[in-house]
Image (cartoon, grey):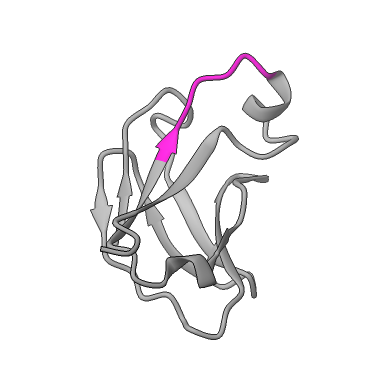
Amino acid sequence: MLVYKKGWYGRFRGLDIFTSENVYLACIKQGEQMEIEIPEDIEFIYGKVDWGETKKLKTQDLMDCKYIEIVPFFTLDPFKNSGLTNLPIEFIIKGKGV
């Protein structure tokens, strides 16, 4: 399950979720929760807004996790805000080992 928290960055934009094979999985907006099926044979997932990408989340880290929290954060870094480096959005694994 994905849980997208509300935050400053990308407030009115959807975050597209892709696999390591660049296969589109879903689009989620802030404040939404969504169940998605992540194929077992992929290396990682990541989010994308226009040309900007988030850091990649390795699927091997998802074993036994309850859900993935997506948290946008505030930054004054113009490179992050424009998508020239990783977007100011973080994937946090919740409930691991529970």
Residue depicted at 61% across the width and 37% down the height: 87
Q: Quadrant of residue 11?
A: top left
Rendered-image quadrant of the C terminus: bottom left
Location of residue 92 in the rendering, given as x and y in whole percent from the top left corner = 43, 47
Residue at 25% x, 46% y: name it.
32
Q: Who is closer to the viewer here, 51 or 38?
A: 38
The span shown in magenta is 71-77
Q: Is residue 72 above or below residue 40?
A: above
Looking at the rendered image, the quarter that the N terminus falls into is bottom left
Residue 67: image x %, image y %?
Answer: 30, 58
Q: Quadrant of residue 76?
A: top right
Question: Which residue is located at x 48 percent, y 84 percent?
Answer: 40
The extreme bottom residue here reads 41
Q: Residue furthest top?
A: 76
Magenta: main secondary structure? loop
Residue 76 among magenta residues: yes
Rendering coords of residue 22 (x, y %): 63, 69
Question: Looking at the image, which residue is at 73% across and 26% down?
Answer: 79
Residue 80 in picture, x, y percent from top left: 66, 29
Left or right of 34: which side holds 86? Answer: right
